[in-house]
Every structure is written in structure tokens, then in C-alpha cells.
């Protein structure tokens, strides 16, 4: 036997096609992660649940991975980017709302009066979000978000918001998907705000984006139906709202969950409480040079109770400063 | 050149692996559909949107097909099967609720008093659904549905409910999926009730089942968290509620929609109003011998306004009696 037909030029492409997936997998995963405990935990978990015959094997259909967005996939300082959008929308829309000049909290936004705005609290904020996110069709709202993203830049980095995403997390999303996970976003952010860019930026399609929602109304309009976004909050996708929306919309319990704040604690608990091997991770913002450093006392992205639970339960806590070689895709220096 | 290496036994399996998908496709689709206008419309639509280079081509990610369930994928007479479940659950649970003996509409259910039950109307019905579908964890509720399905039979056919599904629609679901469509259920039925069996019976996984929902609450229970189903209705997935839930959960507009009643009219309108080629279909129950015949005046599955709109808009209306060679998988006679 000296069969060399496999090497004949006419047959070589067969081998290439058959082996291509293996060749791709062979590339070292997660290049922006330092060789450390978090990367090790991720890779060991993925290998365990994807190795056929392993006692921890999970069928592809059940490889559900959920990610918080603000502070987990992109930055959230000095405040949630969606709120920065809302504030800028108030200014853009002001000519159509002359009454805002005399009505709080809109007056404060138009006059850059941070103190009055801050004093208006959650109620004031919800008024601003309502006025800029509702009483508009889903399609028109998507267009507004995209128009803003195309021009807006972050006050500190002067980069577009959609570039202030974490390179190590992009690699993690890719790594999971290349291992037949489905990656979902489960975020306190409003769902259509995220859908406007999540597929292009993260590769997460609309049907895998879960978030806070407003009531909506079907309006027929003589054969040109629209879905109108209504001011009443339908679901607050934060804290205990996250496992609730996961159960309602996915109908399967995730085996992998990543967050960064106390608002993700219940999602991680819910993931952890399932049978079989599970992965729970938290991004810990420890890098004041390259990003921001905050945790237990922060107004935005407070990480306190979830950090205690992570330590008690042995969840993975990622030290951004030490474990991420690069933060943003635009970073030119790599640790 | 006389290369016969392709026919060598050691290489034949290569060809089989490579050609297998084509061999499968070559089988005639939709064998339980008569050669008629509905089958022709379906096949022409699928070929148009899946042919690369066709002006009607739609990328696989946007091949979203939505199906109503009651009366579209399975029967709905003499009443919605979910209500039959609720009534039987009242009897099963009665020993734990001695107060039901004296309280309507439960008393009427326990005494088989059809008139009083019917007189209790929608409010009475919602009381019965609430008492049997809520104040219970999602997991316990799924177990109840499955236990019922394992034993219950339909009053007329004496077949399990999960066998009273339409063979032609099973073939349609398969045909669409083999053409890279994702098939969703969008139904007035309660979402977990359907998830209990939709994957096994229809091949539709939990995350592609959309339906009516109740509020839910996350309860931690000392590290054993549960999602508790609460009595308050969260979303009524009927009529205008269908396009609303499609937009909220899928975030893409379907290109293919099938229903059978006025409760599906808005879903079909919403599908029709998108750009490019669309398919809108209605199952018309015309077969009193093999199933039931009803439309404009039926209390269950009333098809009146949607039938008028289908005729005006040239939507596909399937005449069950004439166009389906077989109704149920268990039917032994084929037209």
C-alpha cells in the first residue's frame, strides 16, 4: 500500500475544506488576555463543556452565554452612554419643544446645569429618557440612535462610543461563538438602543439582545403599520429583572454569564444554580490609567454585594489592570 | 485523462458527505399538500428568496417565519387545548383547594356545570387560568404541563393533544428550516405551556416560542433561586399584541407568516408591510369530516376580517379540505 492519491493536486482542496475548522481553532484564543487565572478558567470551562464524551459536555443548543453590556462589553463612565445620548437628544429636539426652556429637568439639560439635573434624580432622568426614547416608532428611534452614534464622541477619549468596547471581551464573544455558544446581551440598557449597533459592533444579532423595554402599540395607519414606543416602562432589565427576562425570552438557563456590577448579581446566581458545570464572571474596573477604577462606592456600575458573592462562591473576577493586555481596540500599547 | 479515483471505495464516502444535503433537498417537498395554488405559492416564494442572485434573495439571518399555534399548527376545537388543560388542572388540584367547592367559576368546573362556566365569561376563564398557571415556579409549571400531556386525550379523537398537529404544517416547518429559515411560534397561548412540548413536537426550540406571558418574580431562596409566575398578565399575545412581541423579542420583521384567525390579522399585516417579497398565509378550516369546519361565526378561532383582508390583498388561503391530503400524522387515509 502506497496510496498517495490524497496528495494529488486535484484532491488537496478536499482536505483543506475538511480541516479548515480545525486550522482556525488552532490559533491561540483570547490574545488580549494575560496568561492568568481568568483566562485559564474561561478556557478550561469551554474545553470541558465542548469536549465530546466529557462528563461536563453540553449540547450546542444549550450553550447559552449571557453578557451584561454597560461596564462589561463597553465603558460606562462618566455615565451610561445611553444617558449621554438622551441628554444630547434633548438639545437636538429642543427647537420642536419650546416648552422645555421653562420645564425641569429639560431646562437644566439645555443650560448645562449639572446640579439641578443631578437633583432631579431618577424621576428627572426617566422624564428625559421617556421624552427622547418614546412616542416614536421603532424604526425612527433606531435611525435617531444611529445618527447620534455616527457623530458623537466620548467626552474623555474623544472616540466614537462604539469604539469604547473592550477588545478582550470581543475576543471572548468570538471564542465562545467559535465553540458553538450563542452569545446574548442581557442589559439594563434599552433594547432598541442596543440593537441599533450590537450586531455590527459585537456580532450579536437583534434577537439575541435583551434589555429594558417600554410598552409598545401597534398602529395600522392605512396599510403602513408602525410599532409606536409608549412612555410606560414595560420591563426594567436590571438586577432580578435579568433572570426574569432570560427565562421569559430565552426559556433556557445560561451556562455562562458575565457582568460587572451588583445589577448582574441575580443573573449570575441564576446561572450558577443550574445543574452541571457553569461559568460566572465579573469585570472588575481596576485600571484608572487606561479606563476607570471604581467598585463599591461608585454611583455608576456599583460593584459591592456581587463582589462579595463572587469571592464566597469562587466566581471569576477579572482584574482589568492586571489581566487585560489591551482595553480598547484603538489602544496602540499592549501590556 | 481517465481518472477514476473518485470511484475508489476509500473515497466514495467523501462524495456522500459532500452531496448529502443536495440529495436530501431533491426529495419532493410538502408531500401532504395537494398540487394546488397554496403549495405553488409557498414553493415559489421559498425559491425566490433563497436563490442566490435572485432580485428577491433574502440573507439567511433575515429568513424569519412566524406561525400562530392554535388552529394553525394544531387543532383548537371544541376549545383551546390550553383551556382544557386548565379545567383538568382545577379538578386535579381541587383537594388542595377545599374553598373551590363553593366558589365560582371553580364550582362549575368541579360539577361539570357548562352553563355556569360559560356564563362566567372571560373573567371566569382568566380566574381559572390564573389559578392553574401562576403562583408556581416555571420549572414546576413545565412539569405539570408535561404530566398532563402524557395522559390526557382529546374528547373527540381520543388521541393525545400533541398528536393533533397538522402533518402538512410539520412538513412546511421542515421545508422552511431546510431552506435556512428560522421558524418561530407567535401565539395567544401561554409561552411556557407551549415550550413544554414545542421542541419535541414541532422542532421549535424554547427561544423561538413567543406567547402570552404573566409577570414573573425572581426569588432567591437561600441559593436555590426560582422564577415564580405571578397572576398579573404581562402581555396578551393576540391580535395587535403579535407584531408588538415580534418587534420586542425578535427585533426583525418576518418575511413569512401563517395564521388562521382574526387574531393573526395584525401579524400578517406587519409581515406584509415590509420591503421585498413576503408570504402571508391563512389556514381555512373547511373540513368537517376530517377536522372541523368554521370561520366567520365561530367562538374559537373566528376568521372574518382577516379572511376579507386575505382576499383583498391576495394572501394565500389554504382550503384544508381540498388542499391537504392528510390532516394529522395518525391519519391512515390520504386523499
Image (tube, coloured by chain):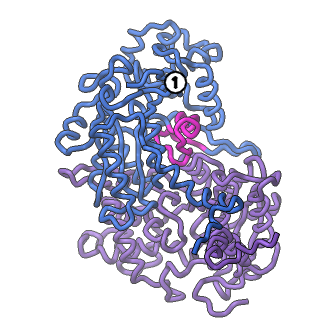
Chain colours: A purple, B blue
Residue at horizontal 27 percent and vertical 30 percent from the top: B303
Q: Is A15 in front, or is A295?
A: A15
Residue at horizontal 38 percent and vertical 20 percent from the top: B290
Would you say residue B101 sits in the magenta stretch? no
Q: Is A170 in front, or is B106?
A: A170
Q: How many marks?
A: 1
Residue A208 to residue B301: above or below: below
Q: What is the x, y in percent for residue B4?
A: 62, 66
Residue B208 to residue A292: above or below: above
Residue B266 visible? The answer is: yes
Report which residue position mark 1 lands on: B161
Residue B158 to residue A27: above or below: above
Residue B217, image quadrant:
top right
Could you tell me which chain the residue with mark 1 belongs to? B
Residue A72 visible? The answer is: no
Residue range highlighted in magenta: B191-217
Q: Residues within 10 Å of mark 1 (few under 14, many from 20)?
A: many
Residue at horizontal 60 percent and vertical 23 percent from the top: B148
Residue A100, image quadrant:
bottom left
Residue at horizontal 62 percent and vertical 29 percent from the top: B146
Residue A156 to residue B131: above or below: below
Mark 1, secondary structure of its residue: helix
Q: What is the x, y in percent for residue A127?
A: 39, 62
Q: Which of the image's four quarters has the C terminus of chain A?
A: bottom right
Q: Is residue B300 left or right of residue A238?
A: left
Amino acid at each position: 500500500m502506497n496510496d498517495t492519491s490524497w496528495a494529488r493536486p486535484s484532491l488537496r482542496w478536499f482536505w483543506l475544506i475538511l480541516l479548515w475548522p480545525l486550522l482556525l481553532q488552532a490559533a491561540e484564543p483570547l490574545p488580549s488576555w494575560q496568561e492568568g487565572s481568568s483566562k485559564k478558567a474561561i478556557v478550561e470551562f469551554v474545553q470541558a463543556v465542548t469536549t465530546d464524551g466529557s462528563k461536563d459536555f453540553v449540547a450546542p443548543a444549550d450553550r447559552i452565554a449571557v453578557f451584561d453590556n454597560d461596564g462589561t462589553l463597553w465603558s460606562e463612565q462618566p455615565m451610561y452612554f445611553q444617558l449621554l445620548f438622551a441628554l444630547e437628544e434633548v438639545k437636538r429636539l429642543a427647537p420642536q419643544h419650546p416648552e422645555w426652556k421653562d420645564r425641569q429637568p429639560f431646562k437644566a439639560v439645555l443650560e448645562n446645569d449639572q446640579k439641578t439635573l443631578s437633583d432631579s434624580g431618577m424621576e428627572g432622568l426617566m422624564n428625559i429618557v421617556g421624552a427622547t426614547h418614546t412616542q416614536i416608532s421603532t424604526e425612527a428611534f433606531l435611525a435617531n440612535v444611529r445618527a447620534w452614534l455616527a457623530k458623537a464622541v466620548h467626552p474623555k477619549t474623544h472616540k466614537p462610543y462604539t469604539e469604547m468596547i473592550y477588545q478582550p471581551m470581543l475576543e471572548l464573544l468570538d471564542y465562545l461563538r467559535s465553540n458553538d455558544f450563542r452569545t446574548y446581551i442581557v442589559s439594563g440598557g434599552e433594547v432598541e438602543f442596543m440593537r441599533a449597533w450590537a450586531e455590527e459592533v459585537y456580532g450579536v444579532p437583534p434577537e439575541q439582545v435583551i434589555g429594558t423595554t417600554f410598552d409598545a402599540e401597534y398602529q395600522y395607519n392605512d396599510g403602513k403599520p408602525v410599532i409606536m414606543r409608549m412612555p410606560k416602562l414595560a420591563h426594567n432589565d436590571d438586577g432580578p429583572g435579568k433572570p426574569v427576562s432570560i427565562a421569559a425570552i430565552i426559556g433556557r438557563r445560561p451556562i455562562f454569564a458575565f457582568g460587572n456590577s451588583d445589577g448582574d448579581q441575580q443573573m449570575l446566581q441564576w446561572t450558577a444554580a443550574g445543574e452541571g458545570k457553569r461559568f460566572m464572571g465579573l469585570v472588575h474596573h481596576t485600571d484608572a490609567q487606561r479606563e476607570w477604577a471604581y467598585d463599591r462606592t461608585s454611583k455608576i456600575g456599583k460593584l459591592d454585594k456581587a463582589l462579595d458573592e463572587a469571592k464566597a462562591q469562587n466566581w471569576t473576577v477579572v482584574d482589568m489592570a492586571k489581566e487585560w493586555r489591551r482595553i480598547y481596540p484603538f489602544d496602540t500599547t499592549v501590556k
